[in-house]
Amino acid sequence: MEDTYISVSRPLVLQTTGAHCMVRVRFDNVTKKFGEVVAVDGMSLSVEDGEFFTFLGPSGCGKTTALRILAGFYKPDQGTIYFDDEIVNDVPPFERNTGMVFQTYALWPHMNVFENVAYGLAIRKVPRDEAKRRVAEALRLVGLQGFEERLPSELSGGQQQRVALARALVIEPKVLLLDEPLSNLDAKLRVQTRVEITRLQKKLRITTVYVTHDQEEALCISDRIAVIEKGRVQQVGSPTEIYEKPQNQFVADFIGVANFLRGRIVGFSQDKRAIVLTDNGTKFETVYDGEISVGAPVLLSFRPEAVEIQEDGEGIGAKNFIEGKIRLASYLGDTVRYEVQAQDGVFKVDVHNPSGKRLLFEGERVRLSFDPALGRILPT
């Protein structure tokens, strides 16, 4: 495989030519502790060249620590970090050729936009004329032409974030690292900016590792996602795989919203569906992956949008129905989310495009049903 630098008239970043994808970054059984706290626990995963890869998890799960290990700010206590096929555990940050965008942007307040973006080039002793061309190109890529003389205090939060992104890109990094870069922006600007980042990453084909706790953000921008809990990788997969085929309860519950029924396998239908008997004696059918045996304890999971809701007395399919009462109705504009109290627990139901449909109220009796093909069996 051959690496070639692109001239400043085209994208700034390192491009790779070749017939197949190569692994750009790899964690091999990496562990990092802070005293008695295990922040990263035996992490093993790989990021392909040109991929947009996201570390997703709740606050304190270890995702930012993993990113800082990748950047070289922390050294792992155990395990190995690879860039391409090179071990970089002892390589200092400035020699790893990564570009970092921090949550707080970390712009120099006394430097104007040009000086902030050019800072990394100055450290690398890039000739002034070359630096000017590269800064101009980086600012063009993020839509900040004409802002060169402004100070950070004269910019909006979104503009400061784009300056930080330009500063990371201008050094032509092998890997772009972003640590919750949108968390300080308001909701509408977050959506706009994540679209810009995704568009830019696809255009430049730069390997990107992104940290966020926002599930929707991760699903929108990522090629693949690593869901992390308590320092451990729970699942790695595409957004579709993570959402539609979660491998355990944490992933199903953290990504979007899920309903759960606890029970055990009591048999199998003729169409190869598992029959689950809940703790309260209700039977449900659903598809299943892998090997599963009669008597095995399981969790049956299904999403709110997979549920049909009907008022009491209306016809409904004979399989997978639940009777209950409306406990709460939340109108969200394009969706109404109901919470339904039933014998087996409280279930969430999403009704999309509610315009023209009667809003159900607290206390009304309803029947719920979900397609067996839309359920998922999880290990307990």
Image (cartoon, rainbow, N blue to C red):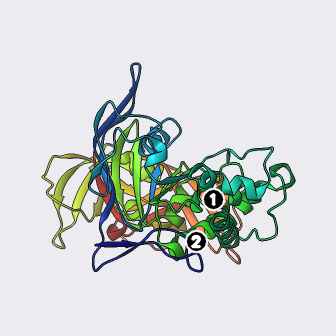
- Say which mark, if any, is on residue 366: none
Dot 1, how many residues are within 10 Å of its Cα: few (below 14), some (14-19), or many (20+)?
many
As helix, strand or loop, the secondary structure at mark 1 comes to helix
Residue nearest the observer in this picture, 82 or 217: 82
Where is residue 26? Give x, y as percent. Answer: 31, 52
Q: Are marks 2 and 1 in contact (CB under 8 Å)?
A: yes
Where is residue 22? Give x, y as percent. Answer: 29, 67
Q: Please give left or right for residue 289 compared with residue 164 in the image.
A: left
As helix, strand or loop, the secondary structure at mark 2 comes to helix
Asked if 117 appears above or below 179 in the picture, the reply is below
Which residue lies under the disc numbered 1? 165
Residue found at x 43% / y 40%: 92
Quadrant location of the N terminus in the rendered image: bottom left
Q: Amino acid at mark 1?
A: Leu
Residue 255 visible: yes
Residue nearest the observer in this picture, 254 or 205: 205
Residue nearest the observer in this picture, 243 or 91: 91
Which residue lies under the disc numbered 2? 200
Residue nearest the observer in this picture, 102 or 347: 102
First-in-chain label (2 vs 1): 1
